[in-house]
């Protein structure tokens, strides 16, 4: 019998960033990476994300204002975002969210940007990708005041407590597993992917060039970016999938198929 090659879907990445040469994306594709959701983070990179979408149908596009970019967003970012989403009807909304980790954050401004983007996603019927670091309290407060997103949303590199999972699932959440979960200190977060989070809500991601696994767990690395940290290679999705498979006591081919099906339900099917 012919072996069916595994095809992995990357739920969250930033191929538009300079740290990721396109040859690395092509290398990942040869190793079994299929569709990838490329997340824009500010008006300055949305055109780049759209260009990647034109280059290969497996490059899916998402446009959004990242909480780190809220302070420097140009005054017309809302019009621009709406324009991009209307021009690309298959695109998702993200990366948006809340972050109380990076110093000097302005939570009220992040909340305002979050609300506006969420309402736009509801109006245009798009899936949403959320970044949330040290802000699960404010996130829950906010979600409870907002209408349910009709297409659902991804909590990328989920790092919150297990107690919140049932309510989030009921509100339409999906959760992605990443190299963040490899660390010995993240056992509580990692174990949620084996029992607490429903199987039909689990995805995998690299966040490339961010979230580089420890060097001994990398298939490949890319030269460091401006911050001096090694950059994550898109092919490391294979390692993320292997780690999830061990966690769930499944074969890598099974978690590949499961997470690809979940990816398509959230981001592709209408
Ligand atoms: Zn990201």
Image: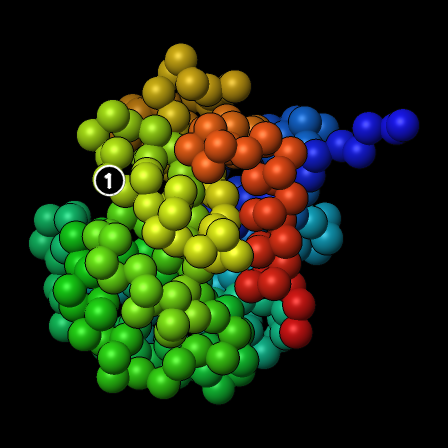
Picture layout, residue 145 above or below residue 10? below
* In-front residue for pair 218/183: 183
The residue under the point 32% across, 39% down is: 191
Residue 98 located left or right of residue 29: left
Q: Which residue ends up furthest to the left in the rendered image? A: 104
Between 246 and 62, which is closer to the camera in this rendering?
246
Residue 51, horizontal then vertical, whole percent: 63, 54
Q: Residue at x 30, y 69 (%)?
A: 167
Residue 243 position within the rendered picture, expressed as x and y whole percent measured from the top left:
45, 29
Q: Is residue 66 left or right of residue 31?
A: left
Q: What residue do we see at 46% from left, 28% from top?
A: 246
Q: Which residue is mark 1?
A: 188
In this rendering, is residue 255 above or below 263?
above
Residue sitting at 57 percent across and 39 percent down? 255
Q: Is residue 167 above or below residue 132?
A: below
Is residue 66 in sight in this rendering?
A: no
Residue 34 showing in the rendered view: yes
Quadrant including the C terminus: bottom right
Q: Quadrant of residue 107?
A: bottom left
């Amino acid at each position: 019998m012919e072996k069916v090659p595994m095809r992995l879907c990357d739920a969250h990445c930033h191929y538009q960033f300079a740290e990721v040469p396109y040859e690395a994306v092509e290398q990942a594709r040869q190793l079994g990476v299929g569709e990838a959701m490329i997340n824009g983070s500010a008006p300055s990179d949305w055109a780049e994300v759209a260009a990647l979408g034109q280059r290969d149908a497996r490059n899916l596009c998402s446009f959004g204002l990242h909480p780190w970019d809220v302070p420097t967003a140009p005054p017309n970012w809302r019009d621009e975002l709406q324009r991009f989403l209307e021009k690309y009807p298959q695109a998702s909304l993200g990366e948006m969210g809340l972050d109380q980790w990076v110093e000097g954050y302005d939570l009220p401004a992040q909340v305002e940007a979050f609300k506006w983007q969420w309402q736009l996603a509801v109006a245009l019927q798009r899936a949403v990708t959320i970044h949330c670091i040290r802000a699960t309290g404010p996130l829950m407060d906010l979600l409870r005041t907002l209408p349910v997103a009709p297409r659902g949303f991804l909590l990328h590199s989920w790092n919150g407590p297990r107690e919140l999972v049932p309510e989030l699932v009921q509100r339409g959440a999906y959760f992605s597993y990443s190299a963040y979960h490899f660390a010995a200190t993240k056992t509580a977060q990692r174990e949620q992917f084996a029992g607490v989070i429903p199987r039909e809500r689990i995805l995998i991601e690299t966040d490339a060039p961010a979230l580089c696994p420890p060097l001994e767990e990398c298939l490949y690395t890319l030269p460091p970016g401006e911050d001096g940290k090694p950059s994550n290679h898109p092919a490391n999705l294979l390692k993320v999938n292997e780690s999830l498979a061990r966690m769930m006591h499944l074969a890598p081919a099974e978690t590949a198929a499961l997470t690809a099906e979940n990816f398509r339900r959230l981001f592709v099917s209408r």
